[in-house]
Image (spheres, grey):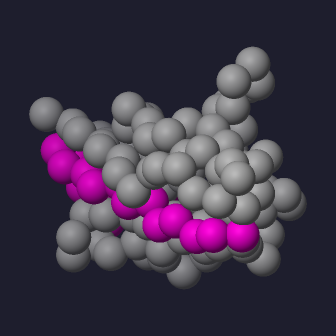
Amino acid sequence: QVQLVESGGGLVQPGESLRLSCATSGFTFSSAAMSWYRQAPGKERELVASITSAGTSTNFVDSVKGRFTTSRDNAKNTVYLQMNSLKPEDTAVYYCKAVGTLLFRRYEYWGQGTQVTVSS
């Protein structure tokens, strides 16, 4: 059974930091590219960050560059999103996603999301 469980969200003030975790099971984590998405109320889900299966390359949406980093621990089947200098516009539900191939078929798995609220 595939599971992706995000944690670490919460309510913080502008300028503070949070670290999100996405713990996974049920698939070969080390072979999957991982991404973080977010969805704010009334807005479409957007890609925030991604990291390759080996963790050697990352990409970020322009609005979070220089503030967010992502990393993974393939021994723990977990991916992280470190969010610094948070702004009110970062408020959203954050989701992790795994993408890979199995037996030449592409798969895509999503977590259930964790709420991040940035407010004074």
Question: Given the current orientation, which residue lies at the most extreme right position?
Answer: 62
Label count reads 0
Q: Residue at x 27, y 55 (%)?
A: 23
In front: 2, or 61? 61
* In the image, residue 100 above or below residue 16: above
In front: 108, or 79? 79
Question: Given the current orientation, which residue lies at the most extreme front position?
Answer: 120
Position in image of residue 36 (x %, y %): 56, 50
Q: Residue at x 44, y 37 (%)?
A: 113
Q: What is the span of residues highlighted in magenta in the rendered image?
A: 15-33
Q: Residue at x 36, y 47 (%)?
A: 6
Q: Is residue 94 left or right of residue 98?
A: right
The N terminus sits in image quarter: top left
Query: In the figure, residue 111 lies in which quadrant?
Result: top left
Position in image of residue 12 (x %, y %): 57, 57
Q: Is residue 82 left or right of residue 109?
A: right
* In the image, residue 52 above or below residue 89: below
Position in image of residue 46 (x %, y %): 71, 38
Query: In the figure, residue 85 lies in which quadrant?
Result: bottom right
Position in image of residue 29 (x %, y %): 29, 58
Residue 59: tell me if it is visible: no
Magenta stretch: residue 92 in it? no
Q: Residue at x 69, y 24 (%)?
A: 41
* In the image, residue 54 above or below residue 39: below
In front: 87, or 100? 87
Magenta stretch: residue 28 in it? yes
